Amino acid sequence: MAAPAASAPVYDVVGLGFGPANVAIAGAIVDKWASTRSGDATSHVPLQQVLFIEKQPEFRWHPGMLLPNSRMQISFLKDLATLRSPQSFITFLAYLHSQDRLITFINRGSFTPTRREYADYLSWAAEAVQKRGIQVRYGEEVVGVTRLEDGTIEVCSRDTATGEESRRVTKNLIISPGGSPKLPPALSVHWPHPRIFHSSSYISSADAFFASISQTSEPLRIAVVGAGQSATEVLLDLQSRLNALPLPSGKKHVLDMIFRKGSLKPSDDSPFSNEIFDPATTDFMFRLPTQRDRQHVLREYNPTNYSVVNINTIENLYEVMYHQKLLDGIKARTGREDESNRTRITLLPNTSIYAADIVSPSSEASSTSESVRLTLHNVLTRAVSLKTYDAVFCGTGYDRDSWTRLLASSNLAEHFGIKSSSIELVAESEGPTTTHLFADLDDIESRISSSSTDGFSTPPTPDTPHSHHSPLSRGSHPSKVRISRTYRLLSERESKGEAAGPHEARVYLQGCTQSTHGLSESLLSILGVRAGLVVDELCNTSGAGNQSTL
Ligand SMILES: Cc1cc2nc3c(=O)[nH]c(=O)nc-3n(C[C@H](O)[C@H](O)[C@H](O)COP(=O)(O)OP(=O)(O)OC[C@H]3O[C@@H](n4cnc5c(N)ncnc54)[C@H](O)[C@@H]3O)c2cc1C
């Protein structure tokens, strides 16, 4: 095991990623500094050296889906801090006030900001914490972590522009990586490919795709995969882009939406169901006796978030499709074609993608680019059909397991008792693992939950003959790692009831613990409260080595 370099500065906290989860942590730390300074002048100010490492070149919140007029699916009061402390400097109200829009926002009479405004709020907050002393390195990707001899952790990051590596040592690590794009297995084997896109980069991909086809004499054929919020928003946006692309009269662009469900389903945001996102529900979930019980609750509340669409978006799409039918009727009766009706949307429900092949441009075809041929399987009639598309856009959610690869490839694996590349989180509150009649079912369920998709997506797609299998999800029995209510991973020694070493670095996980902490984990609802718990624990339990005097 490596010894720490004598001259290197040691951070109190290093955070992987600087998305909303870690901005909320930064805000809670700054609030802690302020309350310590305004109290006893001789008291120790905790966690002074704090650094977040973010691979994007600047703060950006889901830039690929900042579609015009798209709205948040959450009250503005569930911002980065209000539920933890309404007096915080990074509340949404403080943002509105600083931008001179508070009264206009009130007059607007809605609890839900647009996604564009919320993204601006988050980037304002990211700047506000930096102005108060939080350090952030943008454009660096964390590529490795190593436990050093003295219990601290060395974080290795790579500059995304130059490839240059940096190493920093920290007493505590907070891993908040968000999700990585998830595609149906049949398509993921070809990804990245210039004709296969994921909603995470929708706007830039669609801009580039349409720029490459500024005019066409042949109709375009586009597929959207998924039945969640993102997929439906992408479908509607593609329809307006296609309608703007002129075609010889009588021809129509093809826009198919492919999904396994029977129809698009509305999200359940009714008040009682919404309580599943309350901070108190996290306590309830965490204390449930077994993983199986938690899976039961997660399944019941899936329609609050998974593979569902806001009812307004569903109604918009229905209206668009009704209008399409109206114009078809007018054309059939009068022979008059409406110039704006250039796209034919077709929903293909009960359909899964069995296989995908890349088709080279043939010499006779007018297109000079590759296309994607999908083998579609109707899950009810079992009919198989082949369809070829110029582009396929997937709104199929995110995997949240990048942290498992980071730990499994580090010497921290030994520290946490990780023996295989597949990791399953276990709530600290659970007793020793017992084998019972449904052990196999538990295994399957926990595997599904560790690669869960978010509410802007569809659920995991079954494997197909063309699937690519991640070594993390297959082939080995998962290593169980215990996690505390305060989101700290417990070392193997602690799991056996032994005390942690006094200078042992703490490793926290944010946004990836749905299986132990519940549905709000990957969302925004409890960010402020969650950050407060982590920061309180870091401040309360940090020994002399973790504190410094101003
Ligand atoms: C289009 C869209 C809309 C949404 N709307 C809502 C909503 O209305 N309400 C709601 O509750 N939730 C919503 N969500 C869910 C979303 O997950 C949360 O809003 C939020 O982004 C979670 O914050 P996070 O910090 O955990 O993850 P992220 O926002 O994903 O941030 C993680 C950050 O870590 C960085 N990172 C990852 N790996 C590394 C690495 N190795 N090195 C350095 N940096 C790294 C990433 O670049 C990223 O900036 C939405 C999601 C999407 C996709």
Image: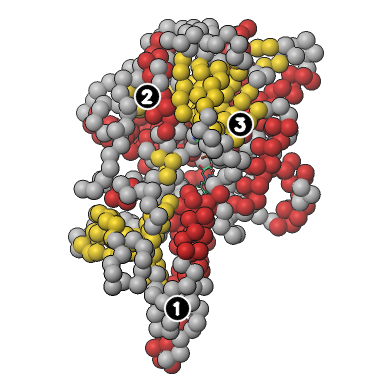
Q: Eyeballing the image, is 361 above or below 352?
A: below
Q: Residues within 10 Å of mark 1 (few under 14, many from 20)?
A: many
The x, y position of residue 261, in whole percent, is 33, 57
Lateral position of residue 250 relative to residue 155, left or right: left
**Location of the N terminus (image quadrant):** top left
Q: Mark 2 points at which residue?
A: 408
User: Which residue is under mark 3?
Assistant: 137
Q: Residue 294 in the image: state x and y as whole percent.
A: 38, 33
Of residues 197 and 239, the one nearer the viewer is: 197
Q: Quadrant location of residue 359?
A: bottom left
Q: Mark 1: is the Cβ under 8 angstroms from ligand 1? A: no
Does the residue at mark 3 contact the one at mark 1 (Cβ under 8 Å)? no
Between marks 1 and 2 in the image, the one whose residue lies nearer the viewer: 1
Per the rendering, the mark at residue 247 is 1
- Residue at 62% across, 15% down: 9
**Three-letter amino acid code at the position of disc 1:** Leu
Instruction: Please identify the quarter of the rendering in which residue 536 is found.
Output: top right
The type of residue carrying mark 2 is: Ala
Residue 176 visible from this viewpoint: no
Name the spot of residue 122 as percent of width and height, x first.
64, 42
Q: Distance between the residues labelled 3 and 2?
A: 25 Å
* Residue displayed at 46% across by 18% down: 146
Q: Earlier in the sequence, mark 1 or mark 2?
A: 1
Looking at the rendered structure, the secondary structure element under dot 3 is strand
Label 1 vs label 2: CA separation?
A: 53 Å
Amino acid type for the residue under numbered disc 3: Arg
